[in-house]
Amino acid sequence: MRPVRFVLLIICFMSIFSAGAQRRVTPVKTASKNLAGVNENKQPGDSIDRSRLVSVTDEQGNKILVDTVTGKEMPDTLAVDGVTQGRVPKMINPLLFSASVGIDLWDPMMRIFGQSYGLVGLSAELNLHNRYIPVVEVGLGNASSTPSNQNYTYHVGVSPYFRIGANYNFLYNSNPDYQFVAGLRFGWTRFDYQLRNVSISDPYWGQDQIVDFPTQTSSVTYLNVIFGLRVKIWKPISMGWNVRFRTILHETDQLDGKPWYIPGYGSRKGIITGSFSVFYTFSLAGKKKTETDLPPGFELEPGPEVPPGAPDVEDPSDNGRRPVSPMSTETEPFE
């Protein structure tokens, strides 16, 4: 009997030990019933009233919820089968946002203050999403300069130049009346230049002779790195200022020296120049968005209909002429 008692004692001791070693689970506090749909850790302004929401579909087929009062957008996390349909696109403006033509007034203004080279430049650009802006620039340049204390005149006839590149607008989701851009331009020009009225003194005879050197032809490819601002001044008219860092990529070798002036590039002196342009912009995005309009690229889905037999409630703001659903008067918050 003594071994049996000993075994029973061991079994009882092990039962007591295992019961005391069980993990205790703290009961989870249930969510607040009067704040259904609201994350209580957030600020009240972070919630959206469900009665103001409309469900829309963007260009990629994603479901988006839009607050018709504040314009706030968020992904529709209540998609079919609990699967999120997508997220709000990063760019709020349509692909074809606008197109602009401009005239560069930098050289004409500088010639008023004594600059001896440059004529005028024109540009055309296409604004994509108000973010990516391909640009084409063409213009005319010439020079006729007699350096001080020198015995010649450097002459370049009226010659065309071409530049192509693009800008990136860092303010693409902000007010489109303002742009802060960085960009690149690849330029090319082919032109003739000449040294004229070269005064040569003959020390033996004591006479001066005026000659013109033969005309030379040069082809130059160069690069501009651009940082600029643009602001709207009146309706479709805007102004832009650019700072250009420039460098020559390739040019024709010349036996008698390199050209001093290059159309579209400017003088060889220094690596920094500027431009000042006036633009006329054509909107390609349609009318401006109002409080009741949806973002570009979205289309309105039909909302839930009023259940049959539901009583009509007159809208006081409509003088009783339009029946509305009682659901529209509720303000159930939604995260």
Image (cartoon, rainbow, N blue to C red):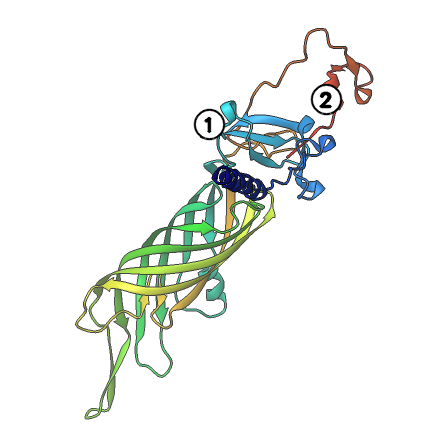
Residue drawn at x 82%, y 18% as measured from the top left: 319
Closest to the observer, 134 or 212: 134
Label 1, on which residue?
61
Residue 267 in the image, given as x and y percentages of width and height: 36, 69
Report the number of numbered marks: 2
How far apart in space, not on screen, are marks 2 and 1 (Cα)? Answer: 27 Å
Name the residue at the front extreme. Answer: 1
Within the image, what quadrant is residue 176 found in? top right
Q: From this viewpoint, which residue is outermost toward the top?
A: 309
Q: Earlier in the sequence, mark 2 or mark 1?
A: 1
Q: Is residue 295 visible?
A: yes
Give SS at disc 1: loop
Asked whether the beta carbons under mark 2 and mark 1 sit within 8 Å of each other, the answer is no
**Circle 2 SS class:** helix
Q: Amino acid at mark 2?
A: Ser
Q: Measuring from the top left, give residue 290's x and y in whole percent.
A: 64, 33
Q: Is residue 143 above or below residue 206?
A: above
Q: Identify the residue position indicated by label 2 in the image.
A: 328
Depicted 62 relative to depicted 123: above or below: above
- In the image, taking residue 191 as reference, residue 328 lies left or right, namely right
Kindly tell me whether residue 264 is visible in this rendering.
Answer: no
Mark 2 crowdedness (10 Å alpha carbons): few <14, some 14-19, many ≥20: few
Image side of residue 44 versus residue 107, left or right: right
Identify the residue at image location x=21%, y=72%.
213
Type of amino acid under label 1: Gly
Name which quarter of the figure residue 39 lies in.
top right
**Quarter of the C terminus within the rendering:** top right
Classed neighbour count for the residue bearing mark 1: other residues with Cα under 10 Å, few (<14), some (14–19), many (≥20):
few
Q: Position of residue 9 (x, y in %)?
A: 54, 41
Q: Toward which corner of the image does residue 182 lie, by quadrant? A: bottom left
The structure residue drawn at horizontal position 42% and vertical position 49%, both measured from the top left corner, is 123
User: Residue reaching furthest bottom?
Assistant: 204
